Amino acid sequence: MHWQNGEQEQAINAWVTVYQLASQIKLAQALQALAGLAEQLGLPGGLTGWAALAQQMRDEG
């Protein structure tokens, strides 16, 4: 919903949170969806791209 409302930063923050949680519990279905989403968004590296964004958010946070 954030993305559709033009709130890209909030959408990405939410997706990174989902990535972090799905990675911790090894939720394959969510990780697969995020990999596909990364491709649609042009985020290089698929899940590696989400990992890099998560690390960047930790570093900034």
Image (cartoon, grey):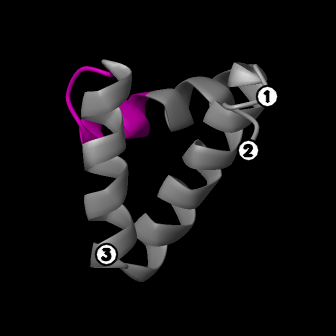
- Tell me whether circle 2 and circle 1 mark residues in contact (CB < 8 Å): yes
Instruction: Estimate the spatial distance between the alpha carbons at disc 3 and disc 2, rounded to whole Å.
Output: 20 Å
Q: Mark 3: give few (<14), some (14-19) or many (20+) Cα within 10 Å.
A: few
Is 5 part of what is drawn in magenta?
no
Q: Is residue 59 left or right of residue 19?
A: right
Answer above or below: position of 12 versus 27. above
Return the x and y of residue 4 as percentages of the image width and height.
Answer: 69, 32
Viewer-side label of 1, 3: 1
Residue lying farthest to the front in this orientation:
4
- Tell me whether circle 1 and circle 3 mark residues in contact (CB < 8 Å): no
Return the x and y of residue 50 as percentages of the image width and height.
Answer: 41, 37
Q: Amino acid at mark 1?
A: Asn
Q: Residue at x 63, y 53 (%)?
A: 17
For the N terminus, the quadrant is top right
According to the picture, the residue beneath numbered tag 2 turns out to be 1
According to the picture, the residue beneath numbered tag 3 turns out to be 29
- Residue 5's disc number: 1
Front residue (pair 4, 25): 4
Answer above or below: position of 19 versus 14. below
Q: Amino acid at mark 2?
A: Met
Q: Mark 2: give few (<14), some (14-19) or many (20+) Cα within 10 Å.
A: few
Is 44 part of what is drawn in magenta?
yes
Return the x and y of residue 21 as percentages of the image width and height.
Answer: 55, 67
Front residue (pair 25, 5): 5
Q: Residue at x 24, y 20 (%)?
A: 44
